Image: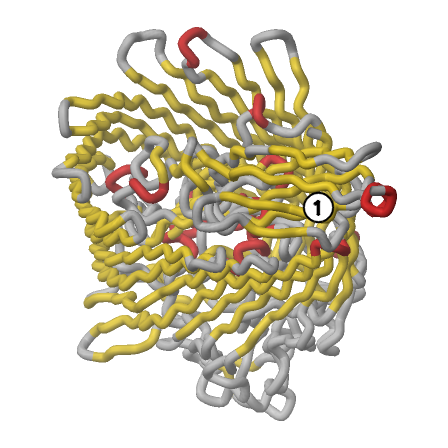
Amino acid sequence: MFYSSLLGQNSIRGTVLSAEVPVPFANIYLKGTTYGTSTNENGLYVLEDIPHGNYVLLVSAVGYETYRKRIEFSGNSRNELLDISLINSAEQLDETVITGTLKPVNRLESPVPVEVYTPAFFKKNPTPSLFDALQNVNGVRPQINCNVCNTGDIHINGLEGPYTLVMIDGMPIVSGLGTVYGLTGIPNSLIEQIEIVKGPASSLYGSEAVGGLINVITKHAPLAPEFSAEAFVTGWGEYNLDVGAKISMGSKTDLLLGVNYFNFDVPTDENGDNFTDVTLQDRISVFQKWNIKREHSRIFSLAGRFFYEDRWGGEMQWTPDFRGGDVIYGESIYTRRWEILGKYQLPLKEKLLLSFSYNDHYQNSVYGDMPYLADQRIGFGQLTWDKSLGKHDLLFGTAVRYNYYDDSTPATSTLRSNEPDKVWIPSIFLQDEIKMGPKLSVLTGLRYDYDDRHGNIFTPRGAVKWKISEQDILRFNAGTGFRVVNLFTEEHAALTGAREVVITEELNPERSFNFNLNYLKKIYADNGSFIGIDASVFYTQFSNIILPDYDTNPNQIIYDNLDGRSISQGISANLDLVFPNGLKFLLGATLQDVKNTENGITQRQILTESYTGTWNVSYTIRSLNLSVDYTGNLYGPMRLPLLGALDPRSEFSPAWSIQNIQFTYNGLPGFEIYGGVKNLLDWTPNRGNPFIIARANDPFDRQVVFDNSGNVVPTADNPYALTFDPSYVYGPNQGIRAFIGLRYQLN
């Protein structure tokens, strides 16, 4: 008896349940020890031979939140009976999604396939902005458009950035001029999840949702942590600070406050061309979200964000004294942006929701000696009525959008006066989801927009969801999209370098037709493992598409509506593997063919990869409170913009990959310490090329000789007949670097 008491022969037994249903193969262990077990097929477990001491009992299972309970064994040995109830997790396939249908639904029940990414996903490869974070999402690629100032956009399934609509809490406040900068400065501490829809969504969201959309959903203030902070630094001298807090303003009001600050001020030239490899940045973003509690749980929230950034890139000896001059080349951009957005549910018996947003984006830029001053304002209001009638789940809506745009280029001026672009676009839309039975539902939708420049625009869509079983779902979606064009808000190449911008005709709105076949499969193995498969076949055809023509004349960028068709087609798949021992795999691959046909000639679209791959491999060593994350991506060759037949640079990029590793220790309550290495292969796009920036030694083209037709003449100083041009870019110039960071959260 004495020997038994000394060893502490304690035990815990019971059943693990979720909503009174047994949870099989759940993992049960004492934190920081080797004592553990798992439930059987009936949810029963026994954990024996536990020494005396204080422990934290952890219970985890795929699809559920981790259960935690403090257990103390002292004095006489005892057998404890403990039944455990688990809560469904939002980290697997049972998340609530909003973007696909404009109303909250379980992801598995949504007729529109929506991909969901939580902060846990992005923590596996911490980045200073959402723009960089999306590099590990399958089928989504952050595209850098300039080697000097590093501005960029987001490609979905190979389509250019202007075809992607970016929203915050469902409000289209990141568009046009703001798309370039809108994904930087959103405090990561305030993000609840990112929802991505691939394919046209114009029937619900209007212009710009042609190729897909990204919806950044911020946290609900009452459910947010009391305080959170994250800071990291890299070996290149980048500093990032993210702070979030919840502040109670009384019994009925909660305030969510977030601040993001990023700084990089170390000019670096690893490739030896006398130009900064990475733009220098100093930015701050402040975000507030107010949540007001009302009777009957009606919605009322109001949010605002202020963003300021000073970024520059150029010759290594550039200083602000040279800004706008023609002595030392630099691209300097001052951006000031503020935005408000809100939602208010009307005090009526019916579900009527008023949503609104407004943003003001001002930019003061110089590209060498070329100034670019721009002011964009976007106002948006929308009223929706959510109504269920028998088998019909209806959504009625009306919206109005106001676009104001003014800049210092000929886009908004004539020989006599300045003429800002002002556009009102009113809309109405209807959506009907019909439950045909327990396994079949059909969704139909139609939107009507009126633009006084282009007239009436109709965008229908339809979807079918067949729930083959509880673990198998098949979805088919088809729809149309449109985009009203504002050229100079989107094409950075029109503002930098020596190419002349040529618009050959009045540009008509672009239209698209898309279909998508999606299959979702869940497999729960007997040993507690989980396999998730999410595969899609997609096809999008565009008419009136506007693409920059770099090929006809190497000294020009020519814009017109394509007299033919453009097609994006392919197959995409994600594979999610979770094992009881703490090993997880998230693998993605996309094969795509994006091409344009005009005058009987078919050509691959420029800066579009033929295949992509992404991976995220994680392993948790529970006894050490340590997790390891290995992330990466792989991109296939893409056609690049050359400056003529003599240009010695490669016409196609090689296959290239960015790979990262991170170690995270979470053994201290509330804290996480992490560190690792980014770009393990030290890959940069200058490999295999004689140079990246054309004529970096002569950025003002003083030594370039032109003939009477404006064509560049080869000379001894310029044997390849080039002009200064930084648009030959397909990947980041930043090489290998270490990083270390710290997170803290107070719940």
Q: Secondary structure at mark 1?
A: strand
The total number of labels drawn is 1
Answer left or right for 668 relative to 149: right
The residue drawn where x is 63% and y is 92% is 716
Front residue of this view, candidates 419 and 664: 664
Tell me if residue 127 comes above or below residue 82 in the rendering: below
The percent coordinates of residue 170 (x first, y second) are 41, 34
Find residue 580 and report its horizontal and vertical position in percent.
56, 57
In the image, taking residue 127 as reference, residue 320 lies left or right, namely right
Q: Give the quarter of the image for residue 620.
A: bottom right
Q: Nearer the viewer, residue 303 or 20?
A: 20
Left/right of residue 581 with respect to residue 206 in the rendered view = right
- Left/right placement of residue 287 relative to residue 654 reads right
Residue shown at 19% from the left, 76% from the top: 599
- Which quadrant holds the C terminus? top right
Amino acid at dot 1: Leu
Quadrant assignment for the N terminus: top right
Taking 351 as reference, is 130 above or below it?
below
Q: Which residue is mark 1?
A: 30
Coloring scheme used = secondary structure
Rendering coords of residue 321 (x, y %): 79, 53
| Residue 715 position within the rendered picture, expressed as x and y whole percent measured from the top left | 58, 90
Please indicate, yes or no, whether residue 735 appears anywhere in the rendered image: yes
